[in-house]
Image (spheres, grey):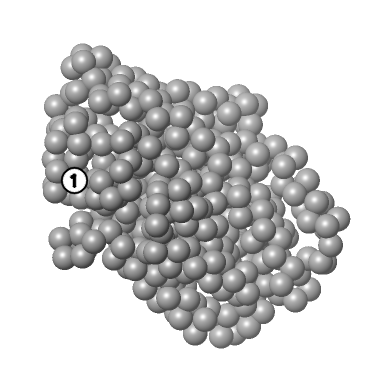
Amino acid sequence: MQAPVETVTKRQPRFGEFVTLAAFMMGLTAFAVDNVLPAFTALGHHFQVADPNRLQWLVYMYMVGFGAMHLVYGPASDMFGRRPAFLVGLVIFLAGCVAAIFAPDFETLLAARVAQGAGAAAGRVVAVAIVRDRFQGREMARVMSLTMMIFITVPIFAPAIGGAILTVFDWRAIFASMLLLGLAAGLWFAKRMPETLKTENRMTVSVASVASSFRLTATNRVALGYATAFGCLFGSIMAYVGSSQQIFAGEVYGLGAWFPVAFASIAFMMGVAGFVNSRLVRRWGMHRLSHWALIGFLVLGVVQCAAALAWSGRPPLLVFGVLLGISHFLTSLAMPNCNALAMEPLGRIAGTASSLIGFYTTLLGALLGGYIGQHFDGTVTPLAFGYLGLAILALGVVVVTERGRLFRPVHAEPP
């Protein structure tokens, strides 16, 4: 294994703990999104939300706050360090949890979700930055894959946990569980994660330095191209998460209380993809894996559309589940590599680059996913055609980024 990049302190957690803690920091986001899905029906009744599609905004408003605050945490982590940036964000997340617990109406609950997302963004930005602080090249892609594998397994359990909570308590306990998880993450991080940003690499506290770093990130062809591809893939995840409760538990398949099982099955495929990627990326490289995965995702998009049309928007559950699971396996194979490729040229401004890329990809994914999700019509047809459209966009952007040359980098990948 490649030796990690020298860091500020020798008080580093071991490799396994480092990866797990980084994944836990990012996992706050997935847990806070997916844990609330089983509560949609209860929340709709409590707040008298007549349109079921409106409940999807509990996901999308969270992601709006999550995406917007990337622009703050990245520069802050480059100026003041990774630790203070994460801990301040965690306080905001915890405040959002408290506000959600005591929300008197649906609009206040949506505002609390924005605050939760705004705070959770610190975990995503800082986790990516500390990985980039310690690792480079394919080893960075391997660590990101392991982190994503753990991060993606959170959805396997989150809806089931939410459903179990609802059997004993009301919907407020869902947000209380997020509060407890945030406190646990903060205590672990404060005790075990040292500062990874070297003093000499800290960015000057000025608007000009932030603007310069943003400009370097936004004008880098590789960073912008792969970030756009990542955003399209993330849009497919957001479209699925936003409408999954309606598809599985509601009017399409009517699984009811079995919804967490179906959701977990799809999430399991995503976790498997992270493990597979971590084993193959050092041998095959980021380009080959991500490009083949994008092509596969496009092919599966065609098959999903054909199945949706053949069964009038309601293919058999097994057919739909298998196709969806394979599609998410392929997206989860491509996403960590696209993210690593976007970050690779930007090591000296990793925090700011991570924030801008996170802002861009999250808002792009939330907008694309929200657009698809809001077209839910009681069938899986909008989701199928949405996946196909996003696959075409993602692959097309990569082709342009690589100037038509797929599977091999223009310049050799770092080992």
Residue 82 position within the rendered picture, expressed as x and y whole percent measured from the top left: 62, 71
Q: SS class of the residue under badge 1?
A: helix
Residue in the foreground of this view, choosing between 200 and 64 = 64
Residue 6's image quarter? Answer: bottom right
State whether residue 146 is above or below residue 187. Answer: above
Q: Is residue 40 left or right of residue 205?
A: left
Residue 44 position within the rendered picture, expressed as x and y whole percent measured from the top left: 29, 45
Residue in the foreground of this view, choosing between 152 and 240 = 240
Local crowd at mark 1 within 10 Å, few (<14), some, or many (≥20)? many
State whether residue 255 is above or below residue 382. Answer: below
Does any portion of residue 147 appear in the rendered image? no
Q: Residue at x 25, y 46 (%)?
A: 45
Residue in the foreground of this view, choosing between 391 and 189 = 189
Residue in the foreground of this view, choosing between 366 and 286 = 366
Q: Residue at x 75, y 40 (%)?
A: 219
Q: Is residue 407 left or right of residue 173?
A: right
Q: Residue at x 62, y 31 (%)?
A: 402
Residue 276 position within the rendered picture, expressed as x and y whole percent measured from the top left: 35, 50
Residue 379 position within the rendered picture, expressed as x and y whole percent measured from the top left: 25, 24
Amino acid carrying mark 1 in the image: Phe
State whether residue 347 is above or below residue 201. Answer: above
Does any portion of residue 182 appear in the rendered image? yes
Residue holding disc 1: 259
Q: Is residue 332 left or right of residue 50?
A: right
State whether residue 372 is above or below residue 245. Answer: above
**Count of numbered circles on the image:** 1
What is the quadrant of the C terminus in the image?
Answer: bottom right
Q: Residue at x 57, y 59 (%)?
A: 125
